[in-house]
Amino acid sequence: MLAVVLIIGGVSVGGFYLLRHRFDSQIERFDAFEGVKDRPTPAENADAKQPLNFLILGSDSRISKGDLNKIEYGQQRSDALMVAQLSADRTAVTVMSIPRDSWVDIPGHGKAKINAGLSFGGIPLAVQTVENLTKIHIDHVMLVDFESFKQLTDELGGVTIQTREGAQHMSGDEALVFAQTRKTLPQGDFDRMRRQQAWMRAIAQTIFNQDILTSPTKMYTLLDILTKTTLMDETLTMAKLQSMALESTSLRPGSVRFITAPYAGTGRSPDGKQSIVNLDMARSEPVFDAFANGRAAEFLADNPKAAPSLDDRPLD
């Protein structure tokens, strides 16, 4: 997501306004908020700009708008779920992963894993599930698949990810395997989320390290990949992305913080058939409140141990 905003910012600064329509037309869009009820109130800010919250749903397989129109029970569960907040002053991004197996209330369906929201009722139910759990007002929704991350990685000539064994330079295929692995990791899905976050960070860092934003040819290629493989809600137009990017020129990879919603551990569903994640709501609620109030970056700066962080320990 950071790569999308920053690259589009580079395009707008470079004066390639004529390309906007082309890229805009390549993005598949959907109505993310149809029928969503009892929504949280957006955070208020004294400045003209408001913090913006993005719900990012990730999948290991390609999702198209046609798929969304034909979702049935048991299909298209999200493999990754993140809430990202762009701060009101546009100087920080805070990305919170919510474990996909978190046992939560799905409106109208009772208790289930949080990633079942997409399967039960499409994007709107996924939004309502997250909003009901966190009390965070979601402004925009994006669907991405890790196949597009693989393409981006190869286009960049690979990325370097810091692991317990040291820095590892990975191709797209290698990074995809790295981010999909979970069964052999000490903490299973929890480590898998950290690997996904590390891959996102590595892509953003590589874009800056290679001065991609000053290369029209490279920017065009990356934008072409991103706009063909990312689905966005219908309010997230290219014009709005450009506006956000121009407001966020001070953002750098170091301005992005990755955390995971605090959890108490794993368990079994009441019927004993499913392995689930139990969120630690006593610890999660202050973090959720910080997002809801538009102060996630400030809260975590003051309370660095409030939530598990990507940088807490070496990456397995």
Image (cartoon, grey):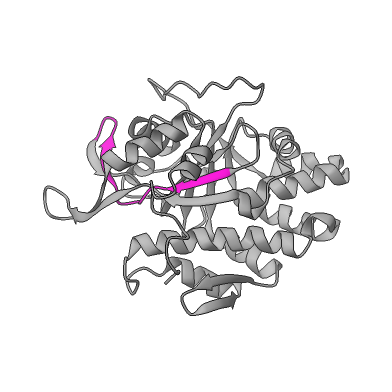
Number of callouts:
0
Q: Left or right? Give the position of 120 relative to 122.
A: left
Q: Residue at x 84, y 59 (%)?
A: 215
Q: Residue furthest left?
A: 271
- When asked about the image quadrant of residue 107, the answer is top left
Q: Position of residue 135 (x, y in %)?
A: 38, 29
Residue 253 drawn at (x, y percent) = 64, 54
Q: Is residue 130 visible?
A: no
Magenta-colored span: 93-109
**What residue occupies the far front of the structure in this picture?**
302
Residue 58 point in image, percent of width and height = 48, 52
Relative side of 88 to 128, left or right: right
* Residue 127 falls in image quadrant: top left
Q: Is residue 43 magenta?
A: no
Task: Depth check: give the residue in front, 156 or 169.
Answer: 169
Q: Position of residue 175 (x, y in %)?
A: 54, 70
Residue located 68% across and 46% down the image: 251
In the image, 240 versus 34, the foreground residue is 240
- In the depicted structure, whether residue 35 falls above or below residue 233: above
